[in-house]
Image (spheres, rainbow, N blue to C red):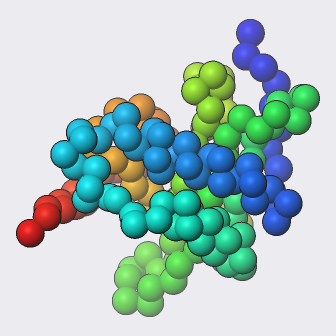
Amino acid sequence: MPRRFRLRPASRRDRESMLVFHRALYVDHRNTLLDGNLQELYAYKDIASALEEDVDSILANPSSCVLFAEDEGGEVLGYITGHIERDTRRVLEKRGVVEDWYVEPDARGEGVGRALLDALLAVFRESGCVVAESSTFPLNAGARRQHEKAGFHEIEIRYRMKI
């Protein structure tokens, strides 16, 4: 039986938990997806500092939304982050951008990820967004399936090479 969980907005006091998840997503998980030859194309000179700067920037940005999922015992199971952008050149001007979406491996398949996404999309809708976008690594089959199940459409493929 899946465990029960609740969603809550993150605060500055969640910084350390967010750093753990950020590292899990952008280092550990990414390294399982990318061939060793491609990792340099995503590498930072100082990944620890980059992750800290990213988390601090998200937590300080008033247009960002960070949600945590935690079980009844308070164990954090996953998180999602996003922000709102406006581009007046677009027909669909106001959009919500899903940035980071991670669920602990032992909590996957229990509805945690979908609940996080649905809650973030609700925040976007309530803020007047008319479109949502997200990105993931091409080899992240699980994330791609979840995006498609949620109704996202693949609209862009980005290439990168060392020159």
Observer-nearest residue: 109 or 61?
61
Q: Is residue 38 above or below residue 87?
A: above
Q: Quadrant of the C terminus?
A: bottom left
- Front residue of 53/112: it is 53
Relative image position of residue 47 (x, y in whole percent): 48, 60
How many tags in the picture? 0
Work out whether residue 29 can be spotted. Answer: yes
Name the residue located 37 percent from the left edge and 40 percent from the top edge: 31
Horizontal arrangement in the rendering, residue 110 relative to residue 29 (left or right): right
Q: Position of residue 87 (x, y in %)?
A: 44, 85
As drawn, which residue projects farthest toward the top?
A: 1
73 w.r.t. 163: above or below: above
Residue at 82% across, 65% down: 12
Work out which quarter of the rendered image holds the N terminus and state it. top right
Expressed as whole percent of the image width and height from the top left, the position of residue 154 reads 30, 51
Residue at x 88%, y 35% (from the top left corner)? 74
The answer to which of 45 and 1 lies nearer the viewer is: 45
Q: Position of residue 156 (x, y in %)?
A: 25, 60
Q: Nearer the viewer, residue 26 or 156?
A: 26
Residue 128 is at least partly visible in this image: no
Q: Residue furthest front?
A: 46
- Left/right placement of residue 32 relative to residue 84 reads left
Farthest bottom residue in view:
88
Q: Is residue 11 above or below residue 114?
A: below
Q: Identify which residue is drawn at 62% across, 46% down.
A: 21
Quarter assignment of residue 19: bottom right
